Image: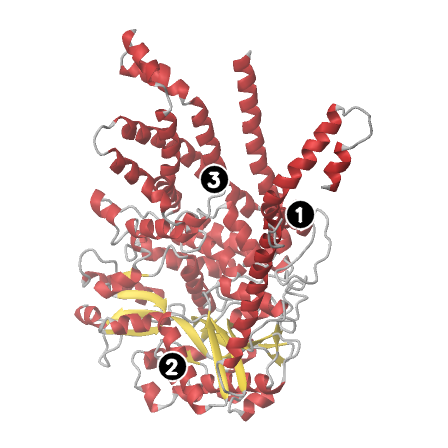
Amino acid sequence: MGRPGLNRRQLLATAGGITVAGSFGFAALGTGADALASSADTRVRYWNLFSGGDGSNMIAMLDAFRAANPDIDVKDSTLQWGNPFYTKLAMAAAGNRAPDLGVMHLGRVPGFSPGRLLDPWDVGLLARYGVREADFDPALWQRGVIDGQLYALPLDIHVQLCFYRKDVLKKAGLLGSDGRIVPVTSTDDWFAVLKEAKKATKKGLQTIGLWVNDQNFQWWFFVAFYTQLGGTWFDAAQRRVTFDTDKAVQVLEFLRRHITDGYADPALGSVNAEQFVNGAPFAWEGNWSVPVYSGAKLDYGAIPLPPVFGEQATHAESHSFVLPHQSDRGGGTNEAAHRLAAYVVTHAQQWAAGGHIPAYTPTLSTPAYKKLDPQSEYVSAMTHQATEPKVWFAGSTGILAQRIGPIVVSSTLGSAKPDTVARRMKSELATLLAMKNPMDGRTAAQGGTAA
Amino acid sequence: MTTSAQTVFAPARATTAADSATLRRKQGFQHGGWFVAPFLVLFTLFVIWPLLRGVYLSFTDANISGDGASFVGLDNYREALDDPLMWDALGHSAYFTLLVVPCITVLAFLLAMLAHHIERGKWLWRLCFFAPFLLPSTVAGNLWQWLFNPGTGMINHVFGIETPWLTDKSYAMLAIVITTLWWTVGFSFLLYLAALQSIPDHLYEAAKLDGANAWHRMVHITLPMLRNITGLVIALQILASLQVFDQAVVMLDFGPGPENATRTFVQYTLEEGFTSYRVGYASAISIIFFVLIAAVALARMWLLRNREEGAAR
């Protein structure tokens, strides 16, 4: 028949083929367009997990870097905070599609298979761009060193703080002549302070918000006070659990007492910030709440968690720069990644606005930093950090926190006795110590991250 | 084409029943096969292959990076059966199912009766009861997270109570159940409504003539006529409820809830695979879960068949 030589089936096949080819084409176009977008010689792909106020501070710092280094193009991607970020980073590194620069919580680095998923920093190169070990808190720097090599370059530490309302504390007679909270050096001191503060608190507000139902916060507070008591987790070889249940019980009873004495209300556990803004005298929170409370124009101060067990220590984690593994890492791009990280670390004044304490200590003694309030009030936290043990299962929202956090909460809320909880924590620690790191099939003792 | 030509012009041997069956199958594939092919390709790629791969991974110690996995035999399964966290998570999913299924079935039936018998503004009732089902789980979860907020939420405010809904282990699951009822009852409601509308009017008319009152009509006509649909609603709800995940994690900010009280089985699998990077172990526990759910589905089919046979006898 006089029909054109194209039947229905061929037509469908052609249409399908065009669609498939087209999608590949677009994919190729995507990569191409990326590369074409900038005239710079070198491009650094940088993944981070900063959103909100931290996100805009980071973008401002990147813009400053771009202005100072026009030959380097920074392509930054912000990904969802927490485990989704780590999953993506791990899979990208394993699939050899890793970005040139990334951000991680320092505590997560030992579990992130340094050497396989992470590449070490070139310390000489960092020094050329102005970053030297001497300018960091020694313990902090060492936490990024694994098997003798630097895998994590700290940008900041973020710590747990005791926020207090100056207006309320003044009424209660709890402010010193310097306008700061009276010193507290024992649990008796602390509960005496709470007792006075409670009298000056408006009706309907709790005296202190300490996230009694939150497994992360309760774990962080536990780490802080347990460290104040001089408690340890494992022996140096990471073969034996050295967790001290007596000390743990002291801490657990201390946390619990805030509820039994009527200072913290479990029903308000998730609205601590709102309560503080409305006039509750105290809130224990991460330093990331500083922009929130400053933005609300509150008359407030913030100190590290009070040394109720004698020693100063407050929980600290750290955002740090890492080099995700690339089989062909090196050359101009790698140097640019070093330059970018070094620049951000040494120009972190902006970062301090988010409440974090810059890890690069020369920043802390600048007049501009000293003027920051309340940042300058809690800057001492840099020298007494309480951290999780340096093992593969530790770190922000890692397995350790996920397993032990809920156990701590069960004591604080009173559904289990402190001594039972302390024993349960110890046995959980033993389980984790015996567990093999899924990334390399080795236990903590075999992992070589004992440093 | 060639195949059919050969068959048609086959030697004088009489075409047997088997031959014509083959013929029908071949011709059937010529048309049907190509139409089904796109689906089959996707189904194989995204269901069959991952399933087989999951079974394989469950016998290895694979991690998330995908390299360096070695065969570990039944180790993962042995560990899973001894894992208190897995049993806890399974218990939470089962508890949720136990609460949701009866509530949703009864509620859907009552709402359907209401919408069916109300004379004015029928469309409005149907819309109201069904609309929440159209929301994505994140919207429903966030909405109820606000409603349950102890300080500013509407629920405590309206009822003048101080229930720590999402922060206390004895209420958290209840809060998720309430959210789920509101969010998904519309689907079962719709099934019931359709079933109600398909009951022939003459049954009711005849019953009325015989002097049956409204209660009798419901017990002796409506309920028996709805038996099949009730079975379907219950089965679908059990399967859906056992897999509870999204609304729970949204409401609890992706955490396991107060003292792990709302960590469901799906969530635990996800955490093991993507937080702990233990893909092999996560595969093993999801296979265990798969077997459990398949057992529930098979049990239902078996019960149904027994009942039908009983009815036929």
Disc 3 marks a residue whose amino acid type is Ala
SS label for mark 1: helix
Q: Mark 2 vs mark 3: tell me if same chain.
A: no
- Cβ atoms at labels 2 and 3 below 8 Å apart: no
* Viewer-proximal residue among A42 and A134: A42
Residue under mark 2: which chain is it in?
A: A
Left or right: B112 with respect to A75?
left
Q: Please, is residue B216 above or below residue A337 in the view? A: above
2 vs 1, front mark:
1
Disc 1 marks a residue whose amino acid type is Leu
How far apart marks 3 and 1 lie (CA) works out to: 23 Å
The residue sitting at 35% across, 65% down in the picture is: A187
Give the residue at mark 2. Answer: A60
Give the residue at mark 3. Answer: B240
How far apart marks 2 and 3 lie (CA) works out to: 46 Å
Residue under mark 3: which chain is it in?
A: B
Residue under mark 1: which chain is it in?
A: B
The residue sitting at 46% across, 27% down in the picture is: B231
Left or right: A369 with respect to A83?
left
Disc 2 marks a residue whose amino acid type is Ala
Give the residue at mark 1. Answer: B52
- The reply to whether residue B116 is in sight is yes
The residue sitting at 62% across, 43% down in the picture is: B81
The residue sitting at 51% across, 72% down in the picture is: A104
Q: Which numbered disc, 3 or 1, marks the residue that appears first in the sequence?
A: 1
* Image x and y of residue B302, in percent: 58, 25
